[in-house]
Image (cartoon, rainbow, N blue to C red):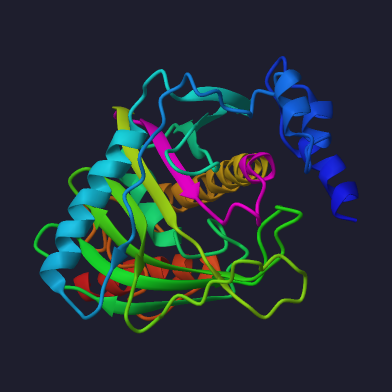
Amino acid sequence: MARLLARYAPLQVPLVEGFEPEGYLELGPGNEEKVQKKRNPYVIGEDQDHARILPSLVLEKSDRRRVEEYAVQAQANAEALCRDDEAWVLRTTNEGVKAYTRPVQNTDQVAIKHIVEYDLPADHVMDLYVKLNYTSVVDPYTTSLRSVETYETSKYEWLQAIHTYDPLAFGVFQTMAPRDYVTLDFVDKEKMMLVSKSIEHPSLPNQSSVDNRWIGSERVFRVPFLYAVKAEGVSDNKTRLVIVHWADIGGNIGRPLYTALAIINFGNKFAEEFRKKLGAIELEITNGKMKVGKTTPSFLSDPLDGGWAKDPEIIFEKLRNLNSDKELQAN
């Protein structure tokens, strides 16, 4: 069944010229050399620069200063990956969304970068992204999410440890084991940037399993992770959104080609869905029903304030009510 599903996986991603799907389909134990000979573009050569991912912070106790120092390092790591350089290789172009890969040191899992432009102000795009970050618009597969610890910070808009649980891997057909993420999430308002970087928190010990890829397994694999989103203003009404994603779900759990294709496809679908949400919200803004962006008091505020909402409509209703309450106060 897994091989049958894998056979259809490439069809979900518009591929660049020269991609040989038969090379992807032949992937399996003992076939790595065959794939290399087919020059599959997802096989990264050793002649390209490997990115470095900051190791996960291991916390033995609550330590605000150490956490904020780590956040600064994680942001610098993410900013380096958000920049354009020749090490990023273009893999797909889908409805204006460009997806790139780049090899990473000490892992077979490549980093993925999506770049997409929206005809909206950068502060509107980033504010809406942050507000929707924990909803099904960004990740429809999460079934549990909570803030583990919130840290006082003088540098960031908010800074907190988050625990996320996904019962299945999205579209990675031979990676059906449950997994969880413990991440340090924060927003830099000045740079309009969101970063999520894996850590080990004392209240959530790592319960990873070396062999955890069977459907129905109750074991949970803890995922090393780096995710970053940066909104760059191209002009007053045009935004370049850069999204970087890297997750090492284990050498024997997710084969790199499956993972890369799944994440690229996932990012393409998100960009399409996010564009629809942006269009609907901008219409409500034009009609005076909702306000977002840097002129609002909730600009880039903690989206978990008041609890986790997976349904984006809950977030939108809060914004509508907030605007209505202010109008009533003004009158």
Screen quadrant of the C terminus: bottom left
The residue stretch that appears in magenta:
235-260
Above or below 178: residue 236: above
Screen quadrant of the N terminus: bottom right
Q: Outermost residue toward the front?
A: 30
- Of residues 93 and 122, the one drawn nearer to the viewer in this rendering: 93
Above or below 215: residue 139: above
Residue 246 screen position, x and y as percent = 47, 47
User: Which quadrant holds residue 6?
Assistant: top right
Residue 177 screen position, x and y as percent = 68, 68
Q: Tell me how many marks there are.
A: 0
Residue shown at the point (85%, 41%) measured from the top left: 8
User: Which quadrant holds residue 214?
Assistant: bottom right
Please say whether residue 247 is one of the residues in the magenta stretch: yes
- The answer to whether one can see residue 294 in this image is no
**Does residue 90 appear to the left or right of 303 in the view shown?**
right
- The answer to whether one can see residue 318 in this image is yes
